Amino acid sequence: MTKKSTKEKDVIDQILDQLDLHGMTQEELFGADGLAKKLTARLLNKALEAEMDTHLGYRKHSNDGDGSGNSRNGYSEKTVIT
């Protein structure tokens, strides 16, 4: 893994600073429905959406793909085991 730039680290630290973890139990942080799992799920979903936007060449809900033969046609629930 490459070393992160100071700017990237600052952005991540700013996001983490917004989380109030005081008083949270280990179960609330790392349990089956814990914060870590929820953050991972949302991060993966955001990355997959960005990948689809790049692949298709337009953003979700844009009319740019209408009639192109290469458009979004819904989604189904996925389970990712991390």
Image (cartoon, rainbow, N blue to C red):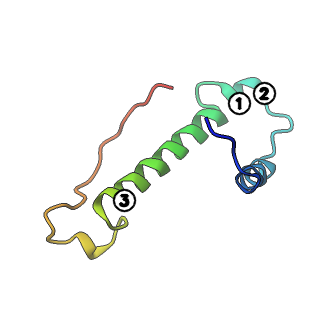
Which circle, 3 or 1, is nearer the viewer? 3
* Mark 1 neighbour class, 10 Å CA radius: few under 14, some 14 to 19, many 20 or more: some
Please tell me which residue lies in front, 10 or 43: 10
Residue 25: give its label. Answer: 2
Q: Which mark is residue 16?
A: none
Q: Compared to 71, does 63 lie above or below?
A: below
Gap in angstroms between the C-alphas marked 3 and 1:
35 Å
Q: Nearer the viewer, residue 19 or 64?
A: 64
Nearest to N terminus: mark 3 or mark 1: 1
User: Is 39 placed above or below 60 here?
Assistant: above
Residue annotated with mark 1 = 28
Q: Residue furthest front?
A: 2
Q: Amino acid at mark 1?
A: Glu
How far apart marks 2 and 1 lie (CA) works out to 5 Å
Q: Amino acid at mark 2?
A: Thr
Q: Residue at x 85, y 34 (%)?
A: 23
2 vs 3, front mark: 3
The circle drawn on residue 54 is 3
How far is the residue under mark 2 from the one under mark 3? 39 Å
State left or right for residue 43 relative to residue 6. left
Query: Relative to 66, is 47 on the left or the right?
Result: right
| Label 2 neighbour load within 10 Å: few <14, some 14-19, many 20+ | few
